[in-house]
Image (cartoon, grey):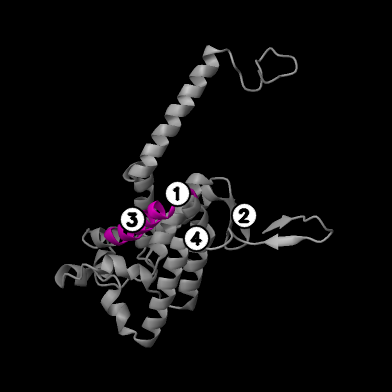
Amino acid sequence: MIRRPPATSSFSYSFGPGPLTPAVKALIAVNVAAFLLAFVMPSINMWFGLHPADVVERLSFWQPVTYMFLHGGVFHILFNMLALWMFGVELERMWGTRYFVKFYFVAGIGAAVTTLVLSFTPLPFANELYHSLTIGASGAVYGILLGYARYFPDRPIYLYFVFPVPAKYFVMIIGAISLFASMGGGGGIAHTTHLGGLVAAYLFIKGGGRTHIVAEIKYRYLKWRINKMRRRFDVYSGGRANDVDRRVH
């Protein structure tokens, strides 16, 4: 919560990142509409949720996309959409709507692909995973969390709504939880999908997003040019080490 003192003696309060951005608004609307439709017609979850056996045996190729618009209960969708708003809005403002949408789907689909691949491994939970049903935007939302931690590493996030943890450590913690939980079978929660969303988002940011790579190269090049010019003209930020008052030259 941010407290801003206005011109008068009273105080105004602001919670969260502000108004919804276009992509976040559209994603929340689609998720809520799909949740209400599934509430009336529960069979939709079986047809459009991620079921590795159906993807392989019945060629249900749409499931790795459609699964992330379905949810299993009110709290499931509430927490996912709350996280999407709180962390996605700032990323969309920074990246732009087009790149943000691309990132969101890469994280969500990457999470589904991770689930599919692991269901074919000799791991103890692979057979259970192959016949399980996965729904929810959690994989994509975990990717959003990683993106947020990448660009705002020291922003505090309240773990379990109680303990303030810097974003970079928060993502490490939830990643470790998902990793160890997936090794134990998951307990009904698709921890492998959560982990897949983190991995897909990380790979996309580091090398998969062309827009990001070009922007990063330009930034590094300009930074190098600026530092080169500083050295050439004997410019030092904060003054030289032997300056008495550390002036900016």
Q: Which mark is residue 164?
A: 2
Judge by depth and name the residue closer to the eye, 232 or 110: 232
- Find the magenta span and give its range: 94-113
Vertical side of 168 occupied by 188: above or below: below
Q: Amino acid at mark 2?
A: Pro
Q: Is residue 162 left or right of residue 231?
A: right
Dividing the image into 4 quarters, which one contains the C terminus? top right
- Residue beneath disc 4: 21
Vertical side of 228 occupied by 129: above or below: below
Look at the magenta stretch and give its main secondary structure: helix
Tally of marks: 4
Q: CA distance from mark 4 to mark 1?
A: 12 Å
Q: Amino acid at mark 1?
A: Trp
Dividing the image into 4 quarters, which one contains the N terminus? bottom right
Residue neighbourhood size for the residue with mark 1, other residues' Cα within 10 Å, grouped as few (<14), some (14–19), many (≥20):
some
Q: CA distance from mark 4 to mark 3?
A: 19 Å
- Residue beneath disc 3: 106
- Residue beneath disc 1: 95
Secondary structure category for the residue under label 2: strand
Circle nearer the N terminus (4, 1)? 4
